[in-house]
Amino acid sequence: MYKLMKKICCSLKDQLGASATEYGIIIAGVAVALIFVFSVLTGRLNEGFQFIINTIRNALGN
């Protein structure tokens, strides 16, 4: 009985380690995706604000 319990416990530990690794890979992928999205959005936001500023300047005649 002890050997059976030991095998079950070892099997569960192996599976938990694999799950943690898989979650780590998923989190790393999400982080890379977020960094990419924020870098793209930063450029787009900068262009949008520049357009607004230029439009206001042209409207005021400066």
Image (cartoon, helix red, strand yellow):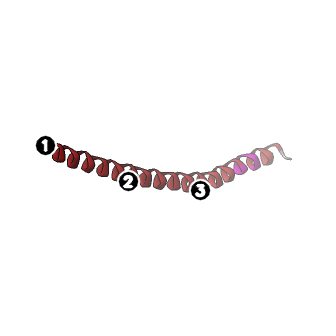
Q: Measure the alpha-carbon separation of dots 1 and 2.
A: 32 Å
Q: Earlier in the sequence, mark 3 or mark 2?
A: 2
Element type where label 3 sits in the image: helix
User: Which residue is the site of mark 2?
Assistant: 22
In x, y percent, where is residue 29? 46, 55
Q: Could you classify mark 3 by the number of other residues whose Cα lies within 10 Å: few (under 14), some (14-19), or many (20 or more)?
A: few
Identify the residue at the far right of this view: 62
User: Which residue is the site of mark 1?
Assistant: 1
Q: Residue at x 51, y 51 (%)?
A: 31
Q: Which amino acid lies under the numbered mark 2 shown in the image of this protein? A: Glu
Q: Which residues are magenta?
A: 50-54
Q: Measure the alpha-carbon separation of dots 3 and 2.
A: 27 Å
Q: Are marks 1 and 2 in contact (CB under 8 Å)?
A: no
| Disc nearest the viewer among 3 and 1 | 1
Q: Could you classify mark 2 by the number of other residues whose Cα lies within 10 Å: few (under 14), some (14-19), or many (20 or more)?
A: few
Q: Which amino acid lies under the numbered mark 3 shown in the image of this protein? A: Val
Element type where label 1 sits in the image: loop
| Disc nearest the viewer among 1 and 2 | 1
Q: Are marks 3 and 1 in contact (CB under 8 Å)?
A: no
Q: Residue at x 21, y 49 (%)?
A: 7
User: Which residue is the site of mark 3?
Assistant: 40
Q: Earlier in the sequence, mark 1 or mark 2?
A: 1
The relative height of residue 33 versus residue 6 in the rendered view (above or below) is below
In x, y percent, where is residue 53? 75, 46
Q: Earlier in the sequence, mark 3 or mark 1?
A: 1
Identify the residue at the far front of this view: 2
Q: Which mark is residue 56?
A: none
Element type where label 2 sits in the image: helix
Q: Could you classify mark 1 by the number of other residues whose Cα lies within 10 Å: few (under 14), some (14-19), or many (20 or more)?
A: few
* Dominant secondary structure (helix, strand or loop) of the stretch shown in magenta: helix
Q: Report the side of 23 relative to 62 (left or right).
A: left
Q: Residue at x 22, y 46 (%)?
A: 6
